[in-house]
Image (tube, helix red, strand yellow):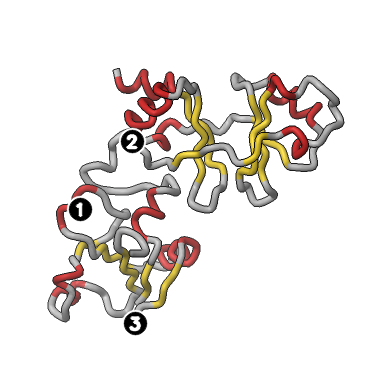
């Protein structure tokens, strides 16, 4: 016999499927988008800037080789030396939310802080994607 | 004593046909549980209630979290 000690909380925080009355409730994970630009710590920001411009977002996310979120690169901070590495200009440790956060609750939190996006990560801090507040709010209408 | 496992081992066991047992109260189980899990609340775990389990397959129990 085995004990999945991290339990249901861990399972749901990985955006894995579930069953039950609340399983169909919209969560942040229902709206995850994976088209955000990413890079690694030692990559020059010049090419990253170009990749950001190909997305609808104003930032890229810096990941470890295992996909753990390390930082955020705002597009507005990348107009300097294109050879500077991501680590030197990133904002370390951006706030993330778990994908099982109810969509309406997250929309309200983002609205109160006047934020347009949220970053989703799993219990190991690996990037799952981002969600847009407008998409959460549109679903709530 | 059950062997503690994490998500990777759980996925392996489920791939091999392991049975999942949610030991949370029935109301909580009804709200949301892992796919395919059966509910045997912790307070009701005994020889009779676990008779529904296939003794030839691995059994994985889970609760809410580590606590």
Tell me whether marks 1 and 2 sit on the same chain. Answer: no
Crowd class of label 1 (few under 14; some 14 to 19; many from 20; radius 10 Å): some
Residue highlighted by disc 3: B1
Left or right, residue B10 beside residue A69 = left
Q: Identify the element where label 2 is drawn.
A: loop
Mark 3 to mark 1 CA distance (whole Å):
24 Å
Residue highlighted by disc 2: A102
Between A118 and A15, which is closer to the camera in this rendering? A118
Residue at image location 45% in from the left, 48% down from the top:
A14
- Residue A101 occupies which quadrant of the picture? top left
Between A18 and B52, which is closer to the camera in this rendering? A18
In the picture, the quarter occupied by the N terminus of chain A is bottom left
Going from N to C along the chain, the mark reached first, 3 or 1, is 3
x, y percent for residue A131: 48, 29
Marks counted in the figure total: 3
Mark 3 to mark 2 CA distance (whole Å):
35 Å
Crowd class of label 3 (few under 14; some 14 to 19; many from 20; radius 10 Å): few
A25 versus A12 height, above or below: above
Residue highlighted by disc 1: B28
């Amino acid at each position: 016999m085995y004990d999945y000690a991290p339990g249901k909380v861990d399972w749901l925080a990985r955006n894995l499927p579930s069953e039950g009355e609340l399983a169909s409730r919209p969560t942040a994970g229902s709206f995850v988008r994976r088209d955000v630009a990413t890079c690694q710590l030692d990559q020059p920001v010049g090419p990253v800037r170009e990749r950001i411009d190909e997305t609808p977002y104003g930032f890229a996310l810096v990941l470890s080789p295992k996909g753990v979120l390390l930082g955020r690169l705002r597009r507005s901070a990348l107009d300097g030396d294109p050879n500077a590495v991501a680590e030197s200009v990133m904002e370390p440790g951006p706030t993330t939310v778990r994908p099982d956060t109810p969509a309406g609750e997250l929309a309200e939190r983002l609205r109160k802080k006047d934020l347009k996006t949220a970053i989703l990560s799993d219990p190991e801090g690996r990037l799952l994607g981002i969600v847009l507040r407008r998409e959460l709010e549109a679903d709530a209408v | 004593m059950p062997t503690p496992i994490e998500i990777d081992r759980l996925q392996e066991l489920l791939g091999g046909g392991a049975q999942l047992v949610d030991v949370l109260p029935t109301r909580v189980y009804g709200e949301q549980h892992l796919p395919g899990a059966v509910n045997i609340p912790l307070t009701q775990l005994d020889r009779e209630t676990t008779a529904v389990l296939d003794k030839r397959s691995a059994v994985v129990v889970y609760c809410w979290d580590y606590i």
